[in-house]
Image: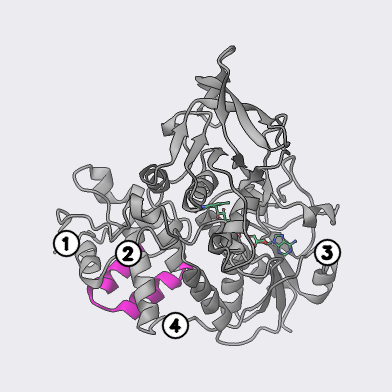
Amino acid sequence: MPNPSLPRQTGKRQSGEERRHNYEEVAQGCNLEEAMQEAERCLNCKDAPCTKACPVNVQIPEFIQLLKEGKIGESASKIMETSLLPAICGRVCPQETHCEGNCVLHKGGKFPAVAVGLLERFVADEARKQDKLIAPKPEKESGFKVAMIGSGPSSLSCAAELRKLGHKVVVFEALHDFGGVLRYGIPSFRLPREIIKAEVDTISDMGVEITPDILVGSSITLDELREEYDAVYIGSGAGLPTMPNIPGENLVGVYSANEFLTRVNLMQAYRFPEVDTPVHVGKNVVVLGGGNSAMDAARCAMRLGRESVTIVYRRGKDGLPAREEEIENAEEEGIKFQFLTVPKEIVADEDGKVAILKCLKTELGEPDASGRRRPQVIEGSGFDIKTDSIIIALGQSPNPIITNTNPDLKTNKWGAVELNEAGETSLKGVYAGGDITRGGATVLLAMKDGIEAAEKMHKYLETKGAK
Ligand code: FAD
């Protein structure tokens, strides 16, 4: 019999003081005994609101039931029927708004939700350790060839689904390593590199070819890909930083979060001098923004040994868009928050380097289109923050290179690629999804787009007849 009154397992975690000096994983997962105890809390609901709330429909009660029966390999295979990135999703997905947020226990208010994320990562990690993680293989080859642009979660999910259906899939990635934001944006203390590599390897083992260092739109054009491949998926993400448009934003010492995180995570600046790709950050760092990028940038800056790191955000704490867990983590690591504040100007010292961030206080007014109360500047509320590095994490918009080099590819006013009702772009046989169409979302939504596009691409290929 399930027992929801058992204490919810949270797994091992490094303390705030310990982890602010290292890049080891913060949340270190649970052991078999703890996982089994947590699994006992699941009521195995017939209508599974957790699964319904999961954008990629992971069969949650089913995989937990298999875990309870000690069938680790089968449990992992159950998850992988709909998601090929279980160890990643278990670590970075916002479970509080999807599966766990809709768990019957949580909704009932008497017990905390089943720790689905913790169990998902446990099953994926354990199955891999026990060599029981089996990459699905196609039954037969279709003879069709498809190309994916970018190796983020959206393209990888699309690639895996199309490969299962027997199509030859080639992924073209601009960077020298794979995973998109998972690799260059999210730090290893949240998502260890070996986890990303292992899940990308599973997709390679299915027969998907993943090629680094190819910038589509420059090394090869979209038209060339369309000539060579039967269909193309654009999953090139949203890597273009949004700037605040204030005086001084181009001064020495101002980074976009993208640049800063890429230097730290992809180029491993935190290992300098062991690696020869350092990043210069001053003693007192200010991060502008309140999303996951802001938390990641602040926490990386802290780990580089800064004296103070302050997040400046225009709304209050309850308006922060970052995952709850990451906000708590940032606080525990000593990150300071300056709420209800907007930047006005960045002022340089005599050497032309960042010295002062001039700010204004805000108050919350009427709700805006998103339903959130709009921050309004309070006139005459100006004050200064002394700083020597500023990291701008105010959001991202779609990468423009492919759309700029293909004027026939329709985009909306924010530069996101537009899709028609059939889920196709304005170019025949070219599909798109993830952040390039949404302009910045989540790993799960990017995966969902990739999986749904694969179904549409498969139907499109079928209309071309057998090869
Ligand atoms: P991306 O992950 O951006 O991948 C796109 C890939 O395409 C990149 O590898 C890029 O190099 C490549 N590319 C671009 N242009 C070209 C080209 N012309 N030719 C070839 N390759 C190209 N979401 C969560 O759910 N949880 C989190 O905790 C979370 N944290 C985040 C932290 C940060 C710092 C950021 C920036 C985002 C975070 N997100 C998080 C959001 C999430 O990571 C993204 O929504 C998701 O990665 C989008 O996936 P994608 O495949 O569409 O694009």
| First of labels 4, 2 by sequence position | 2
**Tag 3 and tag 2, C-beta contact below 8 Å:** no
> Which residue was labeled with disc 4?
134
Give the prevailing secondary structure in the magenta stretch.
helix
Q: Secondary structure at mark 4?
A: loop
Is 367 placed above or below 258 here? above
User: Which quadrant of the rendered structure holds the N terminus?
Assistant: bottom left
The kind of residue on which mark 2 rests is Gly
Question: Farthest top residue?
Answer: 380
Identity of the residue drawn at 60% across and 41% down? 389
Looking at the image, is mark 4 or mark 1 earlier in the sequence? 1
Q: Of the residues shown, which amino acid type is indicated by label 4?
A: Ile
* Residue under label 3: 218
- Based on the picture, tell me whether residue 68 belongs to the magenta stretch: yes
Q: Who's the residue at 14% across and 53% down the image?
A: 5
Question: In the rendered picture of this protein, how many numbered marks are placed on residues?
Answer: 4
Residue at mark 2? 29
Tag 1 or tag 3, which sits nearer the N-term?
1
Is residue 452 shown above or below 324? below
